[in-house]
Amino acid sequence: MIPSICPEVAPPGEKQLFRRLRDDPDTEGWYVLHGLDLAQHTTQMSGEADFVVIVPEYGILVIEVKSHTRIHVDDQGWHLGDQPHPEQRGPFKQAAEAMHSLRKYVVKVDPSYGSFLTWSAACFPRLTFRQKSPEWHDWQIIDRGRLTSAPISTIIKSILLKGRDILIGNNVGCATNQPKYASIERCERITRSLRPIFEVAISPKARRNKLEDDLIHLTEEQYSALDQMMFNPRMIFSGAAGTGKTVLATEALRRTSVEAPQTRLALFCFNKLLGQELHSQCKEIAQHAVVTNIDEWLYSIAKNKLTPAIRNSPDFFKGKLVELAIECLLESDDTLPCFDFIILDEAQDLLQPHYLELLDLILDGGLSSGQWLFFGDFLGQDIFSQGSVSINDFRVNNAPSAAMFGLSANCRNTLPISEYVVSLGQLKPPYAKVLRGDTQEDPELKFWSDGEMQKQQVTTFISECMKAGYRAGDIVLLSPIDEDCLGMQLALDAEWSQKVAPYGMAKNRISYTTIQKFKGMEAPVIILTDFNSIDSSHQQSLFYIGLSRALHCLGIFLHEDLKPVLRSII
């Protein structure tokens, strides 16, 4: 079943058919695509196909489902339930159009798929449908009476066999040998080719940059990851930068919100900018969930105890804020536990004793037996916790029953950028594959000897990006230093002061910030500046993080003293 769970918002008739297909023992080995789960993110074709059932040795059946308890057909059209106006396109026509559209799609992918027997049917699970018409055959009807008299597997096979007989009578040769043409292996391949239409997630961060058309098609391993969410209450997803962790985290939030709307949900991260971005993008898909960076949530809990002296104490962000929040929670007996399900993005930043103590307290069942998902890069991007608690120690001491899933395909960067991430960022092991097939120019790598030279190189690169069609708001300058970085210098320069601003201050300007603050984010154009050393593991991590932020275009500007360092790396 793809997806593996039918959402609560699905019409009752679809839920009923979903359960029958799922629970019938004779459908084992079949592939069933249910188009409603992610219909708002897919093409019109898949949105019109309620169910696509791929049956080895038989063929493909497209089913249109109508959940109404009253249906009447006359010269005006289809009168469905209490709808005030009749529909001109009835369910049989809708199913047939979806079937032809699907067939056209798969044949375009691979002409050999044209040998699959493909047929359509209409399902009325909640009523007895006896209407007759030359527009459909009686055996294309799946109504309440038929569903109660035979298993759904028998019904579907019968329809496909009837369709085969018609094609044979019309001398359509491909219908005569479906056991060969619709072998198990070919059914699996055609499912893989169709699956992206049914499961496509829009990157929330790409939407931030007005790149609504830049869809991230999840890889096969990420489909498996989404499936694993449904069967494992405690999961750790580990992947390098660009492997779609945030996409999966927000999709997990969306699915849980739809399928179990009463669940008390939270999606936390450490980074402030990422928390703001997640909150902005998830407020529409999970209105009742808490989505923010964890310190922001702790502020809201402990605000009555936060004096100026406490705020300025050196240990405020190293455990004091958590301590005060826990005190407030314990003083209010009715607030614990706060959540039924917690999702962490960039989880490596939160593997610190005080955060783990808090999570164990606020989650129903705690970390050992509660429901949670952690998404993180536990090797390359550990710049805040810096290994305070390793992921292995966490599993042994806090959650021995947690399952772990690896993500190895890059779905953010172009191939040239991903190659720089692997080589210069010293990513080991490298990406198993790069999902984006679009061709882009190689990143630009230049060396400077002084600040003025770096400024000239960067401003020239910015001008070239603008000529290529990028907008000012698409461009982000990232630096490993906070004070006196190149971005700040440009913002104070008379020529550039109206074009450059700190990140988040102006949407239509080139922005600048530190790599640390931008971790977990992405932008169409990334420019790395102010690197004059990458000797330490911390600096190398910052360099790797910075390289992997770019969606389309990457500029790297390094001090000339780093030439021998890069030669040794390459």
Image (spheres, rainbow, N blue to C red):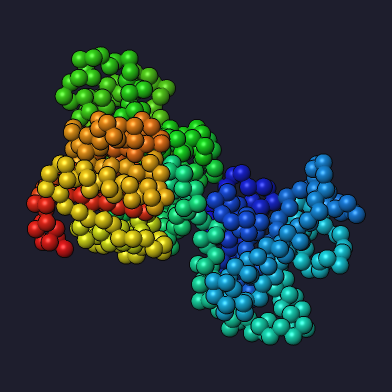
Query: Would you place residue 167 above or below residue 247 in this image?
Result: below
Q: Residue furthest right?
A: 75
Q: Position of residue 143 (x, y in %)?
A: 77, 58
Which residue is located at x 63 percent, y 70 percent?
Answer: 103
- The quadrant of the image that shows the N terminus is bottom right
Q: Position of residue 41 (x, y in %)?
A: 54, 51
Left or right relative to 506: residue 143 = right
Q: How many marks?
A: 0
Q: Is residue 116 left or right of residue 463?
A: right
Looking at this rendering, what residue extends furthest in the front direction? 495
Q: Residue at x 51, y 40 (%)?
A: 285
Looking at the picture, tell me which residue is in the foreground, 440 or 260.
440
| Whether residue 357 can be seen here | no
Q: Nearer the viewer, residue 393 or 320?
A: 320
In the depicted structure, whether residue 143 falls above or below residue 83: below
Q: Is residue 347 left or right of residue 150?
A: left
Q: Position of residue 311 (x, y in %)?
A: 23, 19
| Quadrant of the rendering where the C terminus is positioned | bottom left
User: Quarter-wise, where is residue 153 in the image?
Assistant: bottom right
Q: Would residue 217 be found to the left or right of residue 356 on screen?
A: right
Q: Position of residue 429 (x, y in %)?
A: 24, 62
**Residue located 22% across and 45% down the image:** 456
Judging depth in this view, the residue of 342 and 173 nearest the camera is: 173
Query: Can residue 313 be seen in the rendering of this structure?
Result: yes
